[in-house]
Amino acid sequence: MKKFCSSVLSGVRLGAATLSAILTGAASSETVSVSSLADLEAPSETLNTTGQKPTYQNRTVDGVVQVNTKDATFAVLVDFNAGDSAVNGVIWETGGATIGVSVSYNQAAATLSLHHSSNGGNALGVVTHNLTEAQISGGDVEVVWAYDASEIEWELFVDGVSSGTTVDTTAVDSQNSWSGGNAAGLGIFGGNFAAGNGDNTNLVAIANLGDTATINLDTGLRFWAGTDTALSKPTEKPELQIETVMVTEDGMTITWNGRDGEVYQVWRSSDLETWVELDDSITAGPEGGSFLVEGEGLIAGRMFLQVRQFE
């Protein structure tokens, strides 16, 4: 299929003392890799109210038995507020300091953290994301945390971009369970404890989320039981543009920002209405695309060149 993705070099007059050009362009457990949550099936469970919730320990959700030992994906939309509160406001948690997970927001530090306690509360895995000013002031931010039971680690995604996986911060290794029997909570810490400090004690400076941030309850907390999700935004192709023009005795060489291995065409016109194909199979290399216009390809007077891409 041909994608008409072109860049036009205009205003070139051969033999003139100066060379002027206008460049324009037109845009051309198994981990489930998706570009957005919309690519997943419907959530196994959605919670649309804050408050204390049942623990996930030994629950069966959507046919997945003992979900706290299986792959899992959770997602919420959160509107963060700037401020100087130094507490760790709980967005979501389940279990406790012995076995459990907490996702919290520290307003003063502008950080979003996930803590995973296990192994008698003496193992602690942590991953932290530093929120940008745009993420704090820009309204709802998509926060996703996904558990890989085979690796015994959580991965945190903010606005579709990975912030990394939990790293063990203690000498004791994490174990494959992400919830003990303590109650869960959305917007609050639901039980007596929340993971964690790695010494079987509470998350430091724990607090309810309060007015430091707002969870979008229309979308709610979405839970995909038995699914470890890896979000990867598709790479956007840069706008196709002619980058350099060099006139020599042999002719005129143009270069453009072609992608390595992709095929391009070069066309010529004198009036922007009638186009003549000069080459239809130019394969770009690591440094981009290039073409030498020479011989019959050159015309006297004004000449326009266009690069097109096939996909």
Image: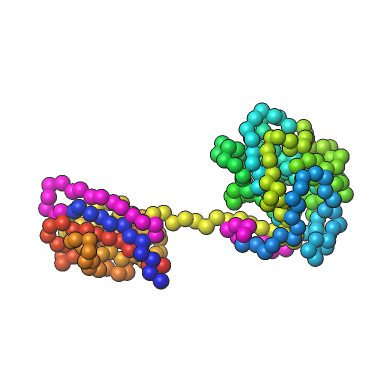
Quadrant of the snapshot with the N terminus: bottom left
The residue at 15%/53% (across/down) is 13
Bounds of the magenta segment: 13-38
Q: Position of residue 126 (x, y in %)?
A: 71, 43
Classify residue 185 by image quadrant.
top right
Quadrant of the snapshot with the C terminus: bottom left
Q: Position of residue 138 (x, y in %)?
A: 57, 40
Q: Nearer the viewer, residue 117 or 93?
A: 93
Residue 55, above or below 65: above
Q: Residue furthest bottom?
A: 1
Q: Nearer the viewer, residue 144 or 198?
A: 144
The residue at 85%/50% (across/down) is 54
The residue at 19%/61% (across/down) is 271
The residue at 83%/61% (across/down) is 60
Q: How many marks?
A: 0
Magenta stretch encompasses residue 30: yes
Would you say 306 lies left or right of 262 here?
left
Q: Nearer the viewer, residue 141 or 65?
A: 141
Would you say 113 lies left or right of 279 here?
right
